[in-house]
Every structure is written in C-alpha cells, then in structure tokens.
Amino acid sequence: MSPLLAEKQKHLTSKDSKGSLLQKMYALLGLILLSGVLSVMSPHFPSFQNILSISLQTAIIAILALGQTYVIISAGIDLSVGSVLALSGVISSQLLVEGVPVLPALIIGIVSGGILGLINGLAITKGNLPPFIVTLGMMGVARGIALVLTNGLPVSGLPDAFTRLGNDRLFYIPIPVLFLIVVAVVGHFVLRRTVFGRYVYAIGSNEEAARLSGIPTALHKTMIYTLCGMFAGLAGVLLSARLISAQPTAGTGYELDAIAAVVIGGASLMGGVTVIGAFIMGVLRNGLNLLSVSPFWQQIAIGLVIVLAVYLDQLRRKKD
C-alpha cells in the first residue's frame, strides 16, 4: 500500500471514529430515553425478568445485524440472512438428530452459512451482479433448500446439551447474550484494528479508488459476504437451540430487522453501533407488547423510527 493511501485511510478512520462516537452517544441517549418513557408507561417494563427477556429476544437479531454491518459499510446489502439462518439451523439440527456431537454440528451449521455467503460474494464479484439481486435470489434458494430438507416440518428431538445453549444462563446472563457479547467485541476489533477492517471502509467509501490503490477488492468483498453468512449461521444455530427445534420457516423477515438495526445504529456513517440499534428495536417491540399495542401499529412505529434515524443521519452528515 502506498504511503499516500495509508495516510488517507488513517485520516478517514480517524474522522469515522469521531462520527461513530457521536452516533453512539445519540443512539445510547435514544435507548435511555425510550426505556425511560416505557418504564413510566408500563411498571412491568423495568423488571429484571423483562430486561433479561429483551436481551434474549434481541441477541439473535443483533448477531445477524453485526454481520450485516460489514456488508452495509462496504456499500452492499444482504437480503438472504434470514433464509441462511433457517437453513443453517436445519442443517445443524438434522446432524444432531443423526447423532453427531454438539460441537461439530454447531461448527458445520456456522460453516454452512459461510458457504452460502461465499456463493453470494463470488456471484457479486466474479459475476458482476448487483448485491440486491444476488442475495434476493439466495433468499429464495436457501429457504427452499431448508423446506426440501425438512419436508416443511420442524426438526425436533434435539439433545439437551444443545438446547441448553439457547435457554440456560451463566451468572444470570442468557447464553445467547454471552455469544452476542463475544461476537460484538471480536467484530469491533476486526473492523477497527485490522487491515481487513480498513479495507471494508475503503471499499464502501470508493470501491474503484480502492481497487486502483492496490486493494484486492474482489477478494475482500467475497470475504465480507462470507463473514456475513457465518454470522447468520451462528444466529440460526442459537435460534434452533432456543426454540428446541429447527423451523424451516424461521427467520422470515429477519433480514429487514437486521438492516433496520444497522441503520438505526448508524452504519450508514461508516461504522455504527449496531448492537444499540438492535436493542432500540427490541425495547420498542417489548414495550409496545406490554402496552398491548397491535402488531400492525408496531410495524408502523418501527418503520417511522427507521425513517427518523436516516433523516437524523443525513442532518449530521450535512453538518460534517
């Protein structure tokens, strides 16, 4: 890499770090205000049990959204993550039912998601196809394979050692939440402290300039989609463990929730706080459920929150 490019990337990363910190403050403040309002409106909301419930419900979407963050930062999109989640969970669960030990089955499920992500990446980089079209197609393919493998029926009879991953707690914290914490810390480190992370930002900022500067953009874009698929695979395995069965229809609509979490978290600013965005959505849904708000109105509320987040993002970028 040339010294000029290195200096430019350092400048962009420094600028982005300041923007990300500001976005984090806004998102965290929004989460606190939303929680405060819901606590006043519903006395059940601030209970310890309800907070644990929100964390458990949000963990799967947050893990899914963390993978989506890499894709969106690189100026792409992955609409297949919900279907990849379902297929990965089905594959792991069927292996478990056949007697495969928990750890190998879990790894194979995650790797299966990565392979589907790899196919997405190759189709985008080698086939020069738009990410929207490729991942939309994979959304149907992965869902169809999950339905074919199960004949449209849930996979049940999973061993207790596996289902405990989705339902047990360690030091009062649900195990899926612990997985989320580990994945978020590692994902943040990779994005902020590695060459790969800097390349993700460079590709999203200007892919052609990055390519001309010597960055192997095709390779790294393929890696980005592969990583997103692995995140979806992990989310699918954990969701199957939590539900004590693998549902071939699981994850329907999750791709929209993941994208919404990323947008609310501020990834459009090149490096958002996706986990906070996911928790804003989780808290909002939980609070509206406690207030007995119709699911139809909940969709309207979440849609308005997404539009507001994008609007505030645009205002902040104009000021910058």
Image (cartoon, grey):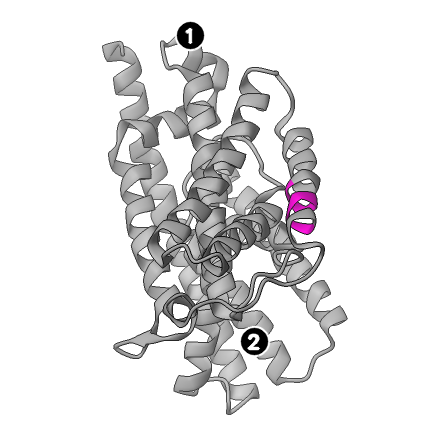
Q: In this view, does 76 lie above or below 60?
A: above
Instruction: Residue lying at the far bottom in this picture: please name it.
Output: 43
Q: Is residue 80 rendered to the left or right of residue 20?
A: right
Most foreground residue, 264 or 82: 82
Identified at 63% across, 77% down, the residue is: 288
Mark 2 neighbour density, 10 Å: few (under 14) some (14–19) many (20 or more): many
Identified at 43% across, 88% down, the residue is: 47
Identified at 76% across, 69% down, the residue is: 296
Identified at 61% across, 42% down, the residue is: 80
Task: Specify whether residue 265 is in view.
Answer: no
Residue 227 - label: none
Which percent across, then down, holds residue 53? 47, 77
**Identity, as a three-letter code, of the amino acid under mark 2:** Asn
Q: How far apart are marks 2 and 1 (CA)?
A: 48 Å
Q: Quadrant of the C terminus?
A: top left
First in residue order: circle 2 vs circle 1: 1
Q: Say which residue label 2 marks.
A: 286
Q: What stretch is highlighted in magenta?
A: 142-147
Q: Is residue 33 rendered to the left or right of residue 179?
A: right
Most foreground residue, 62 or 95: 95
Q: State yes or no: residue 272 in magenta.
A: no
Which percent across, then down, holds residue 123? 59, 22
Which percent across, then down, holds residue 8? 31, 20
Secondary element at tag 2: helix
Which percent across, then down, holds residue 83? 62, 48
Q: Say which residue label 1 marks.
A: 212
Q: Is residue 221 above or below residue 263?
A: above
Secondary element at tag 1: helix
Q: Is residue 316 above or below residue 4?
A: below
**Identity, as a three-letter code, of the amino acid under mark 1:** Leu
Name the chief secondary structure element in magenta: helix
